[in-house]
Amino acid sequence: MFVASFNFMKYYAISFILIFTIPISSYAMKYNITSFGAIGDGVTLNTKAIQNAIDQAYANGGGVVVIPAGKFVSGSIVLKSGTSLHLEKRAILLGSINISDYIKLNRWKALIMADGVTNISITGKGTIDGRGDQLALHIDSLFYAGKIDSHNYYLAERRPWAELRPQIIEFNRCSHIKVTDVLIKNAACWVQTYEKCNNIIIDNIRVDSDAYWNNDGIDIVDCQQVRITNCKINSSDDGICIKSEDFSLSQICDNIYIADCTIRSSSCAVKFGTSLVSGARNVVIKNIKVYDTYRSAIAIECTQGGFIENVLVENIVAKNTGNAIFIRIGKIRGAPTAGPLRNVIIRNIKVSVPFNKPDMAYNIRGPELPYFHNVFPSSITGNPGVYVENVILENIKIIYPGRGLKAYANIPLYRIKDVPELETSYPEFSMFGELPAWGFYVRHVKGLTFKNINLSIKDPDYRPAMVFDDTHQLRIESLKVSGDNKPNPIFYKDTSKVECVNLKVHLKK
């Protein structure tokens, strides 16, 4: 076997480590926000009342700030060490739609904020509603009123930059965090960000945010010891996103466990990047259901100078999803180097790719592409001289619609050199335009194993199932291709040390 072995058993232990490293605090005191003057009429601004309750709980050594049934409008509130925000059933925390009611502690404004504190939580069966469409459109109107400078406005897409639109949750440099059970909906920007935090449990929450652009469901940025489980996410951008934005290179994402979640996204379901300045390692992603997702079920994008290593992805079922697997090294946003991206196992995956766009029912849909193309394959691509290394794909089944026609878009095999490198371009599975394979396109990779791969196509395609270009130390074991009309499913170019075992092709009659 060409691919170097690497042991993922220790990464399964992440879930057990987190159980014991995050303390379960028992708060003796409860502080009902109505006792501090809050009024749940859906109109009154309650920022001061809620903040006073938080401050009082902190002053007394910690406690639970209770939001009872009702609709409580608020601007930015700041959690402090030892405080918990608990939303009772039928409690709704409504984000103000006036941008002046929000403050910035660190990078962006948000409804619920914390910076440099420990032992905080958001719990309960209530709802946090950012009213993002109303808030974002209010900010948008300020530009046309001359109150926002043009450099803060995305003129090409006619909307204010993400940095101007408040998130719902932003925690920075915090430790021992719990977010459980709540419904979080309708963000103006990213739904929730955890940056440079450690010991995080996010469990059994629902995210329903198709309100405006850039509604990432959960963003984990340079955090350690993270456990995300049993969550249901519907987002008009990436569902769960692992990022690294520490330009000092002093922190990375490390020891992250994501499991038993259901995701619908108008971008990617689970994604590394696009921002990946420092790095990410020791990540387990398992038991994920994906549906009606515009881009990739799994996207591993190592494209801003950082590294990605030691990743296990397993037990993924994705239906009506535009792309199955996208793995990419690049150099975007002026990054001086690319990679490394290495030691990745992806196994037990089943994906059905539709012929039409999968997110037509969304309010905020993925963008149209400016060129004609047939259905895109999965892809694994490095850069010239910078290889994706040590990848194992095992027990993979992908069902494609086919119907790829030369007359519609055409990259024949003799023009494979015309597939652009695009080292500095924004990474997406569609970035290269028409690709010369319908199942997998692989370029600039060393140490790759395909084992028990089943690629099926409903109608014939002019392209072969798999194309390997500048790929070395390649093993293909038990490949089944069905529904095609070509007896040879694989094309190689500049590829060495190839071993193929048990290949089966079932031709379309």
Image (tube, rainbow, N blue to C red):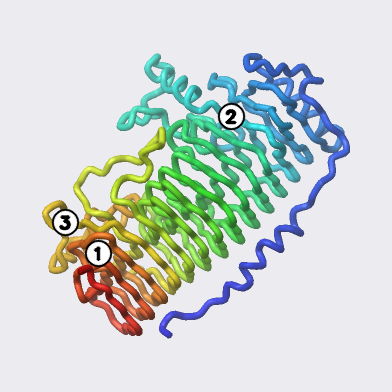
Camera-near label (1 vs 3) is 3
Amino acid carrying mark 3 in the image: Leu
Please identify the residue farthest to the front as the structure is shown: 509
Q: CA distance from mark 2 to mark 3?
A: 46 Å
* Front residue of this view, candidates 157 and 152: 157
Q: Does any portion of residue 191 appear in the rendered image? A: yes
Q: CA distance from mark 2 to mark 1?
A: 44 Å
Tag 2 residue: 129
Tag 3 residue: 405
Tag 1 residue: 437
* Front residue of this view, candidates 483 and 68: 483
- The quarter of the image holding the N terminus is bottom left
Q: With respect to residue 100, does 469 lie above or below?
A: below
Amino acid carrying mark 1 in the image: Ala
Q: With respect to residue 328, does 53 lie above or below?
A: above
Residue 50 placement (x, y as % from top left): 73, 25
